[in-house]
């Protein structure tokens, strides 16, 4: 069973979710139906993944009661202007085939374009209108969070950021904690690069009789961040979900966190300068 967090708006968020980039088309529907039937209840999509139709189709086929699901999408940079953001949310809704979206995030702040405050105001108004249940941000640095909160008085429920043992984001997580924002981790498995072969991780996995991916996902849970692993096969989907029946001790958590690198980002997408449309 997946535990739930209670967000700052009173709604619940499963403690682990399913990443959907690049899960699309007929294979994508099959993979998502499998994930839903395996037990995932939080689905992470985005306008720019071009798969909201896939997500909607999988939801209709999987037979999981709608009220158990937390469906996420994200607003792309090209739609930050207020009217455009509003229309974009309705288009997401129609593609998903849902009456409301459980969690909608601004995908990137795009600070050079500097229209993310307008975009946030649009999400705030759509939440008040009942079209969006919870609203949040993604890749927002502390200064972006401070600004939208100061202008609108509304704190995001979630900030989804790159987070994995090479980039554990201690300062960003502290800011989230202070503001009452739940952290979600993208790239939680380090996108299956060298991370899963790190001796620290394989060593702990061996001691506990778990897989390296399970150890890393458990580390996220114990930091209080919601990991969103993407996995194609039913076997890996089940493996990644089976992380609620063991614990890492403090020394193991610390050893994994110590894998951090000076610039541990997987790519070069620093939200201070990265513009994504
Ligand atoms: P992940 O860290 O989730 O890694 C995914 C990779 O790990 C895939 O290659 C997958 O392979 C492999 N994998 C999954 N499970 C296992 C396992 N048990 N053992 C070994 N390998 C495994 O990276 P993502 O970049 O996909 O991030 C997750 C999600 O976060 C995305 O899908 C997306 O929803 C979101 N995201 C958000 C961003 C943002 O800007 N907000 C940016 C990037 C991602 P396979 O599929 O073949 O099983």
Image: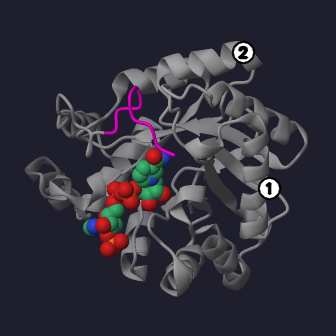
Q: Which range of residues does the magenta coloring cover? A: 269-277
Element assignment for label 2: helix
Residue 22: x %, y % from top left:
44, 68
Residue drawn at x 75%, y 60% as measured from the top left: 91
Which corner quadrant holds the N terminus?
A: bottom right
In this picture, residue 18 sits left or right of residue 205: right
Q: Main secondary structure of the magenta part?
A: loop
Asked whether residue 244 is in view, the answer is no
Residue that sits furthest to the left in the current view: 199
Element assignment for label 1: helix
> How many neighbours does mark 1 have within 10 angstroms: few (below 14), some (14-19), or many (20 or more)?
some
Tag shown at residue 90: 1
In this picture, residue 224 sits left or right of residue 131: left
In this picture, residue 83 sits left or right of residue 37: right
Residue 57: x %, y % from top left:
68, 79
Using the image as rendered, state which of residue 237 and residue 104 is in the foreground. Answer: 104
- For disc 2, the marked residue is 151
| Quadrant of the displayed image that contains ligand 1 | bottom left
Q: Are marks 1 and 2 in contact (CB under 8 Å)?
A: no
Residue drawn at x 49%, y 19% as measured from the top left: 142
Q: Is residue 226 magenta?
A: no
Asked whether residue 205 is in view, the answer is yes
């Amino acid at each position: 069973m997946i535990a739930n967090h209670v967000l700052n708006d009173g709604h619940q968020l499963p403690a682990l979710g399913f990443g959907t980039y690049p899960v699309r088309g007929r294979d994508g529907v099959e993979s998502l139906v499998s994930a839903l039937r395996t037990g995932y209840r939080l689905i992470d999509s985005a306008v720019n993944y071009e798969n909201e139709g896939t997500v909607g189709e999988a939801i209709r086929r999987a037979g999981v009661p709608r009220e158990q699901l937390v469906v996420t999408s994200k607003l792309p940079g090209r739609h930050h202007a207020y009217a455009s953001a509003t229309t974009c949310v309705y288009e997401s809704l129609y593609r998903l085939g849902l009456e409301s979206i459980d969690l909608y995030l601004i995908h990137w702040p795009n600070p050079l374009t500097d229209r993310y405050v307008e975009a946030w105001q649009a999400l705030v108004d759509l939440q008040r209108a009942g079209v969006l249940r919870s609203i949040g941000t993604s890749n927002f640095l502390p200064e972006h969070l401070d600004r939208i909160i100061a202008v609108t008085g509304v704190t995001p429920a979630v900030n989804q950021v790159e987070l994995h043992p090479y980039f554990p984001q201690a300062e960003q997580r502290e800011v989230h904690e202070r503001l009452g924002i739940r952290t979600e981790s993208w790239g939680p498995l380090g996108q299956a690069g060298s991370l899963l072969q790190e001796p620290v991780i394989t060593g702990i996995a061996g001691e506990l009789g778990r897989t390296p991916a399970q150890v890393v996902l458990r580390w996220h849970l114990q930091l209080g961040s919601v990991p969103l692993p993407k996995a194609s096969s039913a076997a890996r989907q089940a493996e990644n979900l089976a992380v609620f029946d063991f614990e890492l001790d403090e020394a193991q958590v610390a050893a994994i966190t110590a894998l951090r690198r000076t610039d541990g980002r997987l790519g070069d997408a620093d939200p201070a300068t990265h513009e994504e449309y």
